[in-house]
Amino acid sequence: MNETGIQLMLCGGEGCSAAGSEKVKTALSDEIKKHGLENKIEIEMTECNGFCAIGPVMTVQPGGVFYQNIKPEDAAELVEEHFIKGNPVERLLYKEPAPKDEIPKLDDIPFFEPQVFRVMRNKGVIDPEIIDEYIARDGYFGAAKALTEMTSEQIVDEMLESGLRGRGGAGFPTGLKWKFAMGAKSDEKYVLCNADEGDPGAFMDRTVLESDPHAVLEGMIIAAKAINSHKGYIYCRSEYPLAIKRLTIAIEQANEYGLLGKDILGSGFDFDIEIYQGAGAFVCGEETALMRSIEGKRGMPRPRPPFPANQGLWEKPTILNNVETLANVAQIILKGGAWYASIGTNTSKGTKVFALSGDITNIGLVEVPMGTTLRTIVYDIGGGVPNKRKFKAVQLGGPSGGCVPEAYLDTPVDYEEIAKVGAIMGSGGAIVMDDRTCMVDMARYFMDFIQDESCGKCTPCREGTKRILTILENICEGKGKPGDIEELEELTHVVGQSALCGLGQTASNPVLATLRYFRDEYEAHIYRKECPARTCVALLKFEVDPEKCKKCGACFKGCPADAITWKKKEVAFIDQDKCVKCLSCYGNCRFGAIM
């Protein structure tokens, strides 16, 4: 065993915790004590390393040996074989092929190899509740440089040179937003962090807050110096209790170290940060609604102009950036805007974090350079669609985004290029769908979400989304009629052009995208009363294929409605009048005999 000791970097993120990482830690601790190795082996619970699909995961230092799918009962073998005898436990190593006679490390794993870590540079490396570990990795050096060596103009110029665009969805240039606020005249200004992540399938901001909260605080300090603000708020939804806990700890530690509060680092600059907990309203992700919520009012958007850079929170100049945007700032100031702009495309610089979910092998967080193709993300990093199913589409941008079919998988991740194919970058949610997904039902799901989350302030969004949802529901229930598609196209155009805020203006995107690429599925639902994906239950009719039926009776035994007739050595029969279309027979049949 290495005389300098062994450090076990055990993932304690949400995914690995759900898979039992706390029990693994307890088992490892017990085994370490059993062998009297407490002074030579240290267990450190880190945050998510991104590879959620194979958790709990652990990296052993020195050596960087990467273990996956660890269970409490593996603890004894790990301690005895690896930590004492020096022989890594092969059955727990990552299973992808590695060079012969080499133990696979993180860099050998295809999931990590195409990625570039800037926002997630500290993932799985530091304890997010210990400020010294963040400082040891150049933490707060960017803030120190900004406060003691740079003017506001120099900070803004560096941000402009970096080309960083807002990662919350719209992609507005961060430096330009700061420049407007810097030039605004006021006795008070505010810096806000939007941590109200509400897109289904999105967990990027939550993970950054849980794994590297000081990066966000440092970004806010630099933003405050740039616009001469002395007060900041982090608007975080209350459904993120661990993120709020770690932000609270981080703020306390930063104050204790003189990195927040009065006269930061002796620079004469004062800045305080407060956490404001939101109630989970999706509309409060819109900047003006978020500001109204902090003011104690109902979270509803207001018309623009005036823009927040001139009249924002309490009608004072305000800049609002999301978590991922702010997590980039300190490195830009420390290493320079040119460094940040050295990767990416002409119009989209740096990296982008995506949350991969849905019908994909490697569910988790990924960070890739702008310009990386969707095919690389879905197949090279995500491992493609599992169970030999066929890829159908990937939904980008959440409820406000659009689906990208297989024909456009070679589209590079770039704000403009993604928009050309009918989607948006959004905050970074990427939901992969296989051939079992009904695209009409998918559009209905997102429209149901948007309609439910609409604040109701403006008529186009309040009434328009309701009417669009009704049409989609009728189509999925077999009640679609000729003219529905044309009415959907007209309604989506009207709502998009006349809604007050971004939520309403982009509400129709999932419908528009599915009509653009999967119009045939709408026509099948309306004119033939069929669901090609066999998902819309109202359009399904269950029958037994006598050629495939093995006469086992599994369908009969699982039917809750007594709709199936079966006798030993006879083919089952489904009574259509009694069938409630619960899918139990379809799921119970192992031979594909239920049509």
Image (cartoon, rainbow, N blue to C red):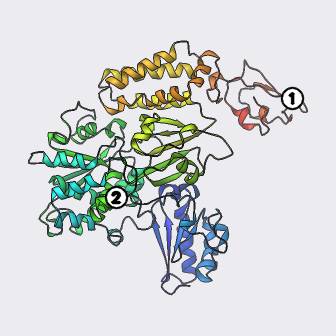
- The picture places residue 362, in percent across and down from the top left corner, at 57, 52
Quadrant of image for the N terminus? bottom right
Residue at image mark 2: 340
Q: CA distance from mark 1 to mark 2?
A: 66 Å
Q: Residue 358: name its quadrant.
A: top right
- The picture places residue 582, in percent across and down from the top left corner, at 66, 29
Q: Residue at the location (53% across, 69% down)?
A: 59
- In this view of the protein, can residue 397 be seen by the observer? no
N-terminal-most mark, 1 or 2: 2
* 143 to the left or right of 391: left
* 423 to the left or right of 84: left
Q: Residue furthest right?
A: 569
- In this view of the protein, can residue 131 be seen by the observer? yes
Q: In the rendered structure, are the residues bearing label 1 and label 2 in contact, judged by CB atoms less than 8 Å apart? A: no
Q: Residue at the location (61% across, 78% down)?
A: 82
- The picture places residue 404, in percent across and down from the top left corner, at 52, 37
Q: Residue at the location (86% across, 36% down)?
A: 550
Against 536, is 592 above or below?
A: below
- Checking the image for residue 292, the label placed there is none
Secondary structure at numbered mark 2: helix
Amino acid type at circle 2 is Tyr
Secondary structure at numbered mark 1: loop
- The picture places residue 196, in percent across and down from the top left corner, at 35, 44
Against 526, is 26 above or below?
A: below
Residue at image mark 1: 571
Quadrant of image for the C terminus? top right
* 355 to the left or right of 296: right
339 and 564: which one is in front? Answer: 339
